[in-house]
Image: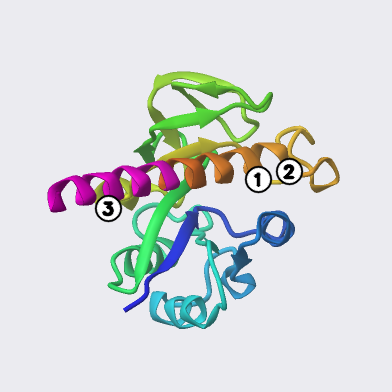
Amino acid sequence: MKKRKVILVTDGDQHVQRALEWLAKQLGGRCISQSQGNPSRLTGKQLVDFILQTPYDPVFVMFDDSGIIGEGAGEQALRYVATHKQIDVLGAIAVASDTNNQEWTKVHVCIDYDGNFTMYGVDKEGICEWEVGRINGDTVYCLDELSIPIVVGIGDIGKMRRRDDIRNGCPITRKAIEYILERSRRDENRKLHTDFSEVE
């Protein structure tokens, strides 16, 4: 059974949709436009159905709790998609928001609004914060509980003081996606090499 390769994105407003649709065309992926919503409108099962209909991957899928504290519709859908047997989660883009530290997740790395990788968390403007390896957001709480190979934290997609504007090519979001894809290819090559060594 062929699995669909998916990147989870924890935001779902129209700026995010436009950015991901544009980047999908640039990077040879697909964006599930129907996953746009603030908050998320589709269930995890509905999203999986759309994902499995895509002709190729990687597939970008949006999830949004719209500021609801706790596990809202977006996180419930995210959990369903991330644990589905036909979905191969390559990574997640954890998008920062103003939650007053009520909801946060660990991240492997963040990208600030200048496009620099950093071990510190970033806020919604993409500015580095003081906490190492964590980011505040409203649709990120369940990420720690899921087996996601790489979680990249960034500020507001398509915004960040216009640094991620679609007219500039959404460079921050693009960098996050490319990093996840690069790490995924590296892990896949390592696994193939390990499997080959075991056969020998």
Q: Is residue 133 shown above or below 58?
A: above
Which residues are the magenta region? 185-200
Question: Which residue is pictured at 38% across the width and 26% down the height?
Answer: 133
Is residue 193 on the magenta stretch? Answer: yes
Badge 2: how crowded within 10 Å, few (<14), some, or many (20+)?
Answer: many
Residue drawn 44% across and 21% down? 119
- Dot 2 corresponds to which residue? 170
Query: Relative to residue 125, is residue 47 drawn left or right?
Result: left
Name the amino acid type tagged 1. Answer: Ile
**Horizontal side of residue 193 vs 26, given as left or right:** left
Identify the mark nearer the N-term, 1 or 3: 3
Q: Which numbered disc, 2 or 3, marks the residue that appears first in the sequence?
A: 3
**Residue 144 vertical position relative to residue 60 in the rendered view, above or below:** above
The x, y position of residue 148, in whole percent, is 33, 49
Q: CA distance from mark 1 to mark 3?
A: 23 Å
Percent from the top left, x then y, of residue 65? 48, 59
Asked whether 123 or 70 is in front, the reply is 123
Q: Amino acid at mark 3?
A: Leu
Residue 146 point in image, percent of width and height = 27, 53
Q: Which residue is mark 1?
A: 157
Asked whether residue 17 is drawn in magenta, I would say no
Pinpoint residue 63: horizontal percent, then vertical percent: 50, 61
Magenta segment's dominant SS is helix
Q: Residue furthest front?
A: 200
Q: Is any atom of residue 156 visible in this view?
A: no
Name which residue type carries label 2.
Cys
